[in-house]
Amino acid sequence: MCQSGEVNVVLSSDYDSLLFGCLYLIKDIDMVEGYAVVITLQSIYSHFNIDHFQAIDICILMGTDYNKKISRIGPKTALAEVQSHGKLENTKYYNKKEFSINRLRQIYNCTYSKHKVRWFSIKANEKFDMLEYSIKIL
C-alpha cells in the first residue's frame, strides 16, 4: 500500500514494513508519556549508506517472515557483507540451493495491492480511538 501511494505512514511493530517501502514507520507508542518511535526509510539508507535493494538483501541474510535465518548471521555481519560486496549474491553466504533470492526480492518489490482502504483524516489535537474505529469497520 505504501509503494502504490495508498498510505503515507504505517503503525506497526514489524520492521518488514520498511522493506515493503513504508516511508515512515511508527512503533512503540507510549500513550502515558505521549511519544512514539518514528523510523524513516531514508534515515536508514543514509545512516548505513545502503539502498532499498541492499536493505532487502541484509534482511534476507538475517531471516525474514519468508525465509529462514542463515546460521551465525546477525545484523552486523549482514550489514558488513552487503556493504562490502554490494549484494547478497557476491557474499560467501549466498547459496543458490538454500533459497530463491529472486522470489524473496519479488515479495518485497511487489506493487500489487488488493486492499480496500477506508480513508479518514485526523486534525491536530483531535482525539482518535483506534480500537473504537477498528471495531466500527469490522
Image (cartoon, rainbow, N blue to C red):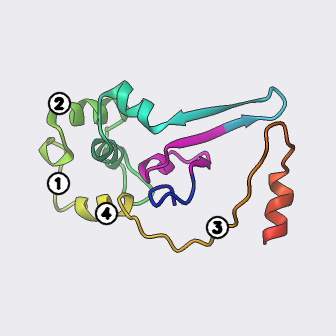
Cα separation, mark 2 vs mark 4, equals 23 Å
Left or right: 92 as drawn, with respect to 108 = left
Whether pointer 3 and pointer 4 mark residues with C-beta atoms closer than 8 Å, the reply is no
Instruction: Please state which of the two labelled residues, at mark 4 or mark 1, is closer to the viewer.
Output: 4
Mark sitting earlier along the chain (2/1):
2
Magenta segment, which residues?
8-27
Instruction: Please state which of the two labelled residues, at mark 2 or mark 1, is closer to the viewer.
Output: 2
Residue 111 percent location from the top left of the image: 40, 65
Whether pointer 1 and pointer 3 mark residues with C-beta atoms closer than 8 Å, the reply is no
The residue pinned by badge 4 equals: 106
The residue located at (46%, 61%) in the rendering is 4
* Quadrant the C terminus occupies: bottom right
Residue 91 percent location from the top left of the image: 15, 41
Q: Give, as a three-letter code, the residue at label 1.
A: Asn
Q: What label sits on residue 95 in the rendered view?
A: 1
Cα separation, mark 2 vs mark 3, equals 41 Å
Cα separation, mark 1 vs mark 3, equals 39 Å
The residue located at (55%, 60%) in the rendering is 6
Mark sitting earlier along the chain (3/4):
4
- Say few, some or many: other residues with alpha carbon within 10 Å of mark 4 (under 14 / 14 to 19 / 20 or more): few
Q: Does the magenta stretch include residue 11?
A: yes
Whether pointer 2 and pointer 4 mark residues with C-beta atoms closer than 8 Å, the reply is no
The residue pinned by badge 3 equals: 117
Q: Give, as a three-letter code, the residue at label 2.
A: Ser
Cα separation, mark 4 vs mark 1, equals 18 Å
Rendered view: 131 above or below 122: below
Q: Give, as a three-letter code, the residue at label 4.
A: Gln
The residue pinned by badge 2 equals: 84
